[in-house]
Image (cartoon, grey):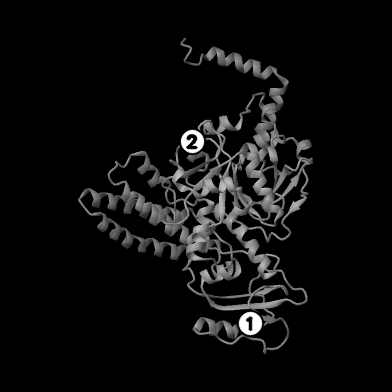
Amino acid sequence: MSEATIDPKWAAKQQKAFSKDRANRIARNSVTSMDVMAAARDVTAMRSYTDTYGISIPKTGDITNQRQSGRCWMFAAFNVLRQEAIKFLDVDTFEFSQAYGMFYDKLEKVNSTLEYIIETTNKPADDRLVQTLLTEGIGDGGYYPFAMNLVKKYGLVPKSAMPETACSKNSDQMDGRINRLFRKDAALLRKAAADGATLDELHATKQKMLGDFYKILSVCLGEPPIKFDFEMKVGKDCKADAKKLFPVEPGENNAPQPAEGSAAKSSAKAGKNLAKDVDKGDKKDEKGAQILRDLNITPLQFAKRYCNVNVDAFVSLVSIPGSKFPYGTVYRVKYVDSVLGGLKARFLNVAPEVLEAATIASLKAGHPVAMACDVMQEFPRRIQDFNYVLSTDTVDFNGLFGVDFDMDRTSMIDHYETCLTHAMTFQGVELGKDGKAKQWRIENSWGKDAGKDGYLIMSADWFRLYGGESDVRREYVSEELLKLWDDETKDVEVDPWSGMGYALGGYGRE
């Protein structure tokens, strides 16, 4: 029999040898009854990890929940930004509307991807780029700069101004309708181009098409507010305009005067109940608490007043040690930018110790950091105990199977074994005697019942092997690296399906 085929006699010998080995029988019985991860867990190693951190953000807010949607990148970014609102308002928790961000993210993705379709009308439908645009272009995934672009262009609103809906919690059915219409419109644009339509005519047709997508999003997510009344209970140290702050006490004398517009008048009338806490997520009720009422405010005004962060002043640091990807280089993923004319999907590749030092400096200064990693690698998410520990020594696949699965990070990157699939937020770090990270405190967006009250413990060695991104403020990056970051003419462009494009998550994290 040819050596290129499997000989049934060889397989029979393997079966006999397997059954004779005591370790094989134990592994088989364990895995077939409780699945791989539960059988491979090392409880002794798991219980050695404790949720203690020498550096930790004191107020992180209630754990958020992206539900069955691919908005992790938006939740991670907004969880960073809300830290500024929490401090400004002097509250224990706060949450921006993820549905509001999702609305405009989808609209911008439709617009940009239809533009890419117009740009590629000279290519056949089965061209790899066209095929990728048709299959990946309108997904839920994204990157940190996607969120910054949305804030810069559309602002922010509190969750109470545009709450979650069935379609934001589980986006499959909405995405199905959007993708169907997108592919229909892509076909129409390609046909029009083949029939001789000019570029101006194609752009005009695309603009008309956007109206239908706006309707779909409004039906599924509700209409995004143009103006709204921001009312909530805040702490005594709230830094808002004093004219908009009213003490919590009996009586109606502190009700605000109506601003112009019916919505504002209605809000002022409702404001007579001064003790009402409009934002139920807030837990402030200590002496000196106040009611903040900012009426008839736009989302851009809200973002500037209550989360005044320079969204341009961040650097996306990654550590991707593939053999073809030198450090000290900025890589830009082509054909994924959602907001045309905004911040691009760019990533500065650095050594892991550089990325970690910038992250630690940010946390020491009280600033959480958005991050990304390959979250399902050696993650015992569905076991009963210690389902919040991400470490390389807590899940023993090698011992369970008697097979060596070990790969170094460079080999995994080069051979498509790992990529940055999920975004979360650094909220703390425990340092060793050498001043380097021992373990990280990670805020997830899977709800408070996932992990340890919504948090994960991530060992430093796990992050170095399966992590590799931190989106940090410019002040924590060296001048030398900032020069590289600021000179976009030296960016190395990569396709989403290339080695670097795949390692960065292709069309974004979900």
Residue at image x 67%, y 78%? 291
The location of residue 205, given as percent across then percent down, is: 28, 59
Q: Which amino acid does label 2 sit on?
A: Gly
Question: At numbered mark 1, what does the secondary structure look like: helix, strand or loop?
Answer: helix
Q: Is residue 353 left or right of residue 266?
A: right
The residue positioned farthest toward the top in the image shown: 1
Kindly check if marks 2 and 1 are in contact, taking CB atoms under 8 A apart as contact.
no
Is 287 above or below relative to 191? below
Q: In this view, does 487 lie to the left or right of 461?
A: left
Question: Which of the 4 image quadrants contains residue 80?
Answer: bottom right
Q: Residue 499, labelled with which disc?
A: 2
Q: Give the mark nearer the N terminus: 2 vs 1.
A: 1
Q: Does residue 177 show up?
A: no
Q: Does residue 174 show up?
A: yes
Number of other residues with Cα within 10 Å of mark 2, as a class: few under 14, some 14 to 19, many 20 or more: some
Q: Residue 147, labelled with which disc?
A: none
Q: How far apart are marks 2 and 1 (CA)?
A: 55 Å
